[in-house]
Image: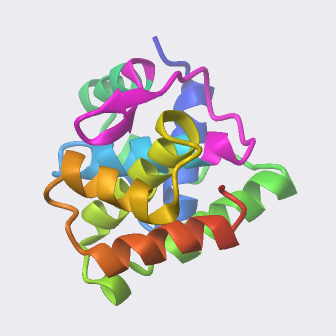
Amino acid sequence: MMTKRGTKILLTAYKNIYGTEFIPHTAGEKLKMHKAIYLLQELGTVCGDFNFFWHINGPYSHELHKGLLEIEANYSVEEIHECSNGCAFKPQAEEAMQKLNNIFSQAGDYGYTPIEWCEALGSIHFIKKYKCSCESDEKIIDILEKEKVNLNMHDSNLQALHLLRENNFL
């Protein structure tokens, strides 16, 4: 069971990264949360005890998913709003969230929807770091595009990998 503090951490992080509040029943929101928390953890920001593994939509955590289902079932819109403004982070975590905000907000620049862009960034990172770390950038993108046929914009995927590298995710 997720604690109130854990809920506040997740919801505040989401708001800081995406600039909007988490709406659990809206399509794509849980996927976006998974990618944000995964990448935050990769930058060293602890948002809970979440183990991520490769899934059809990229990095995925059973523990995080259970927590998000609890939020969906037990929190009203007003309570989500209250929790989304209820947590302070250390400067390093704030910097990591700002990096993610900058990167995630560029979806339209590369022809992807915000949900697809988050999925691409999280998936590219996971493939490069945990599945095929010794492969070239081109090979990483080829693997991505074979495993995720919806993420088929080759040049945009290469740009996503470069953005991750430039922002010290890789």
* Residue 14 appears left or right of 6: left
Residue 8 lies, with reference to residue 141, above or below; the image says: above
Picture colour scheme: rainbow
Q: Position of residue 122 (x, y in %)?
A: 44, 51
Front-most of residues 58 and 139: 139
Q: Position of residue 91 (x, y in %)?
A: 85, 58
- Looking at the rendering, in which quadrant would you find the C terminus? bottom right
Residue sitting farthest toward the right: 91
Residue at 57% in and 76% down: 102
* Residue 136 appears left or right of 138: right
Residue at 60% in and 39% down: 9
Please provide the residue range marked out in magenta: 40-63
Q: Position of residue 127 (x, y in %)?
A: 45, 44
Residue at 37% in and 19% down: 62
Residue 16 lies, with reference to residue 61, above or below; the image says: below
Residue sitting farthest toward the bottom: 109
Front-most of residues 121 and 23: 121
Q: Quadrant of residue 110?
A: bottom left
* Residue 93 appears left or right of 29: right
Residue 94 lies, with reference to residue 62, above or below; the image says: below
Residue at 53% in and 41% down: 38
The answer to whether residue 82 shows anywhere in this view is no
Q: Quadrant of residue 85?
A: bottom right
- Looking at the rendering, in which quadrant would you find the N terminus? top left
Q: Quadrant of residue 134?
A: top right
Front-most of residues 149 and 15: 149
Q: Is residue 77 magenta?
A: no
Q: Position of residue 114 (x, y in %)?
A: 30, 69
Total marks shown come to 0
